Image: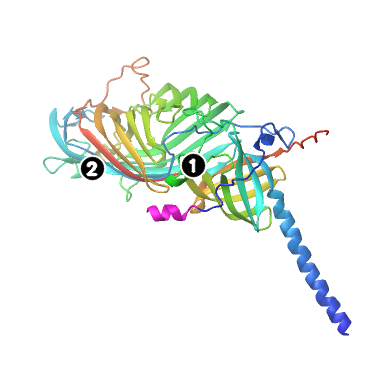
């Protein structure tokens, strides 16, 4: 009898753990390199702890035409951040997978005007994200569609 | 304020790792056949308003008024007279909410309510069409904007509106059969992130009476994001000086106008009269972020009267003059207005 109870408890725990891992795995589908609709940047989404973050890894116009130096976050309302390079900047922050292909609780930063918006991410298919930045309520916002990019594996150099 | 801004920043914003970024230079879409589309905006434009609440006012000016004879020729109201308008003012509010906002299509719907109150020097408003102490012209409208990118460079833009314009009151509102419809269709190109142009055709009441005119859109921002132009000619053309992304100054002109139905006065209601109102506003507009997405716009300038004439509809139909090319039918009343200064201030919730 004791063996049956222990087996049952273990099975239930295993079930919950499997469900949790599956949920976590589903959330990880957000990871990858994505291109916003304007094609001006590419953003790599990674998981740090239990949350998802996206950093700029490529810029169509990488250098400031005025200075000839790599672009920095010059529109940031915080003056101390204005010399920080845009490449490597985390513009998506704190997203949590909520199930049903939706990631919430995060923010998106627009380097063009230095504004940070509430944001919700929906995966409409494995290669397409609907990224909705909004102010307060979802209705007051704008959706941008991001497309997944294929990472080319580097050829190993022969020694 | 400063401490609040600092509180938003944390160490997760920048990753100082040794990643080889060159691996992201040459990538293809994972999905076969995925397309890039051009955006409806360019860099550096003044922010689009999701919700606005404003107040508009003009300094005193004089109005020279013609006489008006009824359809049956039995009654003539007022002889030629000149009156002082001490204050012309009213609230302006509206919203533009995105309904569909995707790369391949952007569709917005909006509502607007504008009013213009006239207050005369002698405690009464000045003419036959303004016999009340403070007569008010109202515009209650609905509008839509559709942006359809064809690819990463070309797009089609459609704007349409239906407005109920007149001196009606909300307790005695006009029938929807008096709606005035305006629309514009443009085809354009967006050759870079800082330039966008389009050409098209508009049906408009901007100068008071119905017209079909060609329109040109041109939006441009310079390399340093300091100077720019925002043009939808002939409706408006403005030069923009960006002090920083939260602070900008625009200068230029804007055409404003509508065709207002004279409805309130029972004796005039069946006369089929409409005021063809058109004005040119030359001025400056200072826009700045009060806090985050709340922006203030403060405008001042000189209002040039273009038209304030009364037209009598022919069998309920508007007279389409095409600037005198198709018809030289006289107006029922030809009035003229002096040119005052105008002021406008609005509180806006701006779009991401």
Quadrant location of the C terminus of chain A in the rendered image: top right
B99 relative position to B20: left or right: left
Q: Earlier in the sequence, mark 2 or mark 1?
A: 1
Q: Nearer the viewer, mark 2 or mark 1?
A: 1
A125 relative position to B170: left or right: right
Q: Nearer the viewer, residue B247 or B135?
A: B247
The verdict on residue B4 being magenta is yes
Chain of the residue on which disc 1 is drawn: B
Residue B181 is drawn in which quadrant? top left
Q: What residue is disc 1 on?
A: B109
**Residue B240 at what x, y percent from top left?**
37, 30
Query: In this figure, what is the number of numbered marks?
Result: 2
A18 relative position to B8: left or right: right
- For residue B28, the mark is none
Q: Nearer the viewer, residue B53 or B267?
A: B53
Residue depicted at 75% across the width and 36% down the height: A152
Q: What residue is disc 2 on?
A: B135
Task: Determine whether the residue tagged by mark 2 lies in a helix, strand or loop.
Answer: strand
- Which stretch did the figure color magenta? B1-9
């Amino acid at each position: 009898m004791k063996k049956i109870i222990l087996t049952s408890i273990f099975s239930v725990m295993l079930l919950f753990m499997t469900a949790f891992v599956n949920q976590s795995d589903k959330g990880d589908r957000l990871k990858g390199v994505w291109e916003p609709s304007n094609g001006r940047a590419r953003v790599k989404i990674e998981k740090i702890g239990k949350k998802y973050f996206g950093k700029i890894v490529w810029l169509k116009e990488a250098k400031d035409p005025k200075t000839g130096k790599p672009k920095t976050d010059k529109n940031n309302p915080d003056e101390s951040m204005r010399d920080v390079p845009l490449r490597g900047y985390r513009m998506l922050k704190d997203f949590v997978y909520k199930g049903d292909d939706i990631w919430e609780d995060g923010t998106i930063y627009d380097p063009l005007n230095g504004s940070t918006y509430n944001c919700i991410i929906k995966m409409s298919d494995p290669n397409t994200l609907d990224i909705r930045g909004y102010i307060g309520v979802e209705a007051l916002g704008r959706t941008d569609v991001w497309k997944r990019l294929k990472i080319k594996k580097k050829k190993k150099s022969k020694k | 304020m400063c401490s609040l801004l600092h509180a938003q920043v944390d160490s997760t914003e920048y990753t100082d790792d040794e990643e080889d970024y060159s691996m992201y230079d040459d990538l293809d879409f994972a999905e076969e056949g995925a397309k890039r589309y051009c955006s409806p905006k360019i860099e550096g434009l003044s922010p689009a308003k999701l919700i606005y609440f404003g107040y508009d006012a003009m300094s005193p000016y004089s109005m020279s008024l013609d006489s008006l004879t009824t359809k049956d020729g039995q009654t003539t109201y007022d002889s030629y007279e000149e009156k002082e308008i001490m204050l012309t003012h009213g609230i302006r509010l509206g919203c533009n909410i995105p309904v569909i906002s995707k790369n391949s299509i952007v569709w917005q719907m909006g509502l607007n309510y504008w009013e213009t109150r006239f207050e005369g020097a002698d405690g009464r408003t000045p003419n036959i069409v303004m016999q009340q102490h403070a007569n008010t012209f109202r515009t209650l409208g609905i509008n839509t904007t559709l942006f359809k990118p064809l690819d990463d460079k070309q797009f089609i833009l459609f704007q349409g509106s239906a407005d109920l314009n007149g001196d009606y009151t909300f307790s005695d509102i006009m029938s929807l059969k008096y709606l005035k419809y305006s629309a514009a269709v443009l085809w354009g190109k967006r050759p870079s992130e800082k330039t966008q142009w389009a050409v098209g055709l508009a049906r408009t009441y901007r100068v008071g009476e119905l017209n079909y005119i060609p329109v040109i859109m041109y939006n441009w921002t310079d390399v340093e994001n300091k100077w720019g132009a925002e043009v939808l000619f002939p409706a408006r053309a403005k030069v923009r000086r960006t002090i920083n992304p939260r602070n900008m100054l625009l200068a230029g002109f804007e055409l404003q106008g509508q065709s207002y139905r004279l409805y309130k006065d029972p004796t005039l209601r069946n006369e089929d009269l409409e005021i063809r109102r058109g004005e040119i506003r030359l001025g400056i507009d200072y826009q700045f972020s009060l806090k985050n997405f709340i922006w203030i716009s403060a405008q001042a300038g000189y209002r040039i009267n273009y038209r304030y004439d009364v037209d009598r509809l022919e069998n309920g139909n508007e007279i389409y003059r095409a600037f005198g090319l198709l018809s030289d039918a006289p107006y029922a009343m030809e009035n003229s207005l002096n040119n005052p200064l105008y002021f406008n201030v609005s509180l806006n919730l701006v779009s991401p």
